[in-house]
Image (cartoon, rainbow, N blue to C red):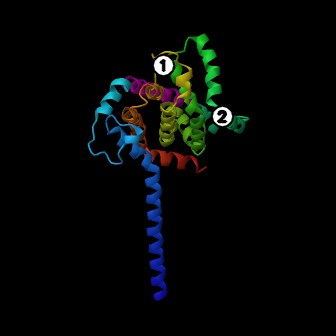
Amino acid sequence: MRQSQRETTAAGARRWGNTALALLILAVMLFPVYWMVSTALQPHSSIASVDLIPTSPSFDNFRAALDTQGGSLVTSLVVALGAVVVCLALAAPAAYGLAQFGLRGGRGIVFGTLITQMVPGIVVANALYSAYAELGLVNSYLGLILADASLGLPFAIVLLRAFMVSIPSEVVEAAMVDGANRFTAFVRIVLPMSRNALITSGLFAFLFAWADFIFALTLNTTDDVKPVTLGIYQFIGAHVSDWGAVMATAVLSAIPAAILLVVAQKYIAAGIAGGSIK
């Protein structure tokens, strides 16, 4: 009896210890976020004069950030959403073909797709700039959308293929027996069944495009198309002494990604788990 009580007490102590350790790690990881928000709420603050807890919080920095970087936030949103559309429009049929058609050399294609993610972004950006200059896509929304779509395309193809491999071919064959052609079966049967994987791929494509800096810097020579990453870079150079406004811009740029991650959390878990079953 006493032995079981000691074991129960030890197990409870381990649980409390694990919880305390997890909270400590979480606090360390979230402290930079807290410092960013705290600095943004302190007007006319420098790095040396920032208080740990803002005693007189103000939203003046956020108003200044919206006045100067509001257009860049809208540009990033347009480019990121466009990149998601292009990425999924290309990745979904490619993944379905690799998963269901039994293509010769399909594994090699998937491996090559993964290899493309190892190429440094600056190498791709320089090559794209030469091509864009000839095609007239420099300083254009379309050019930046296509470039940012390439960031999430390999990941989307691999993830969607891993999910679509587990879809029984009998389901598609039954739809074709009922009169649907292969494209109709793909749109009405395969894509709805792959909803979680599509949402996961789209979210990562959005995050890749939203956080892109290399393409934004290389493929734009004017301020006509200026995403928020490039805006923050230029903003720091012009307001290096006013870190409150800089941090406010960083907070505003992080909000869309944070909202998407919270809203799509269950779909991400289901999409990644579904692709790992096969």
- 56 is higher (above) or lower (below) than 63: below
232 left or right of 138? Answer: left
What secondary structure characterizes most of the magenta part?
helix
Give the quarter of the image for residue 75. top left
Q: Which residues are magenta?
A: 70-91
Give the quarter of the image for residue 251. top left
Disc 2 packing (10 Å; few <14; some 14–19; many ≥20): some
- 235 is higher (above) or lower (below) than 56: above
| Count of numbered marks | 2
Residue at the (57%, 41%) spot, across then down = 159
99 left or right of 227? Answer: right
Find numbered disc 1 in the image and state the secondary structure of the residue it sits on: helix
Which of disc 1 and disc 2 is earlier in sequence?
2
Nearest-to-viewer mark from 2 and 1: 1
Camera-side residue of 264 and 36 = 36
Residue at the extreme bottom of the image, as rendered: 1
- 136 is higher (above) or lower (below) than 217: above
The residue pinned by badge 1 equals 141
Residue at the (42%, 44%) spot, across then down = 33
Residue at the (58%, 46%) spot, across then down = 166
Give the quarter of the image for residue 62. top left
The residue pinned by badge 2 equals 113
- Residue 82 lies in the magenta stretch: yes
- Percent across and percent down for residue 152 are 55, 33
Camera-side residue of 158 and 174 = 158
What residue type is disc 2 on? Thr
32 left or right of 120? Answer: left
- Percent across and percent down for residue 20 are 44, 64
What residue type is disc 1 on? Tyr
